[in-house]
Image (spheres, grey):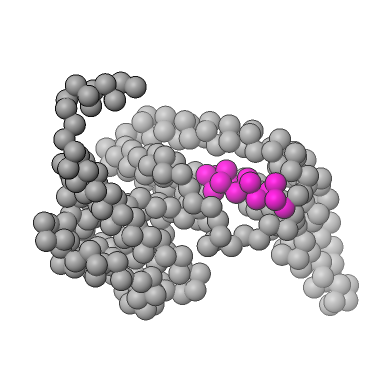
Amino acid sequence: MTHDPFTVLGLEPRFDVDLAAAEVRHRELSRALHPDRYQGKPAAERRMALERAIEVNAAWRALRDPVTRAEALLAAGGVELDERAEPKASPALLMEMMELQEELAEVRGKRDAAGLRRLGEALRTRERELCARLAPAFAAARGDAARLRALLPAVGELRYLRRFFEAYAAAEEELAA
Amino acid sequence: MAYSDKVVEHYENPRNVGTLDKNDPAVGTGLVGAPACGDVMRLQIKVDDGGVITDAKFKTFGCGSAIASSSLATEWLKGKTLGEAETIKNTQIVEELNLPPVKIHCSVLAEDAIKSAIADFRSKQAARRALGAEPVAADTAAAHAGK
């Protein structure tokens, strides 16, 4: 993407972005850029509108997910996202993630829908709390690369949580079937 | 993205999935994660008195390439001495599984897991040797633990 998702949607770059406002912007822009509106226009203009529409969709997707939202803020502040250079997670966090994944596999195996829901809710709460801590930290960093880099471990934790939610969604689907 | 046949094969029939007793002094446990994607990998080795790895188990929560990398690693580890195990390089895993560039970090994770399992085993052994060399009276040990 050439532009960061906040710029694309015309929003202030902040971690606790107003997602409802972002969704409205996405809808407005998508409507304005709809191919129907460009019928009969020159090919170059049609192509540009299509490219913009794709960019707008990608921006909305990026903002909705806390991980990609954080990554956009890091990138805008000049923090390079190199997987080899990322700080390693603390052993305690890894242990916890391993145990949570094992617990998930267990409730999935037992087809324990209530247990699955409980686990999912606990992790959602945890993700919300982590995001609530990250929002003021991003604001305080004011785009400074060194201060943003200090947030990498927390962003890493968000990614471990996201991996968990992926497995969770698969388990949910399986139990619903 | 298309996985290579070997990745799919390991993914569908992972070798040595499971757990060894992490409190067993003969067992070394490596727990590593990839912060860039959120994969977690646990790799355990059981080492006999001659320093030969007699068993290896893994559990990986992550993508197919991460599962295949750790599955392959446990296969390779069995029967190797610790010294030989240490020489396993992520590039060998990449080669064997035909991992594409975006999945190289999965092989790095497996190499890290091997190294950290060996390090864990060695530090356990060193701790035991230290205890053996300097027997600590039970009451002194209790007093230390209580501090």
Q: Is residue B65 magenta?
A: no
* Residue visible at 22% across and 56% down in the picture: B45
* Magenta residues, start to end: A145-158
Would you identify the image quadrant in which residue B2 lies?
A: bottom left
Can you say which quadrant of the picture contains the C terminus of chain B?
Answer: top left
Residue depicted at 56% across the width and 60% down the height: A85
Q: Is residue B117 visible?
A: no
Q: From the viewer's perspective, tell me whether residue B77 is left or right of residue A74.
A: left
Is residue A142 positioned above or below A39 on the image?
above
Left or right for B9, reference B103: left
Taking the spot 59% from the left edge, 62% from the top edge, the residue there is: A82
Residue A164 percent across, percent down from the top left: 45, 45
| Res. B45 visible in picture | yes
Report the side of B6 relative to A144 (left or right).
left
Residue A138, compared with residue B60, is above or below; it is above
Q: Quadrant of residue A34?
A: bottom right
Residue at far left of view: B49
Q: Name the magenta segment's main secondary structure.
A: helix
Point out residue A142 in the picture as x, y percentages from the top left corner. Answer: 78, 44
> Residue at (53%, 52%) from the top-left corner?
A87
Residue placed most toward the observer, B63 or A46: B63
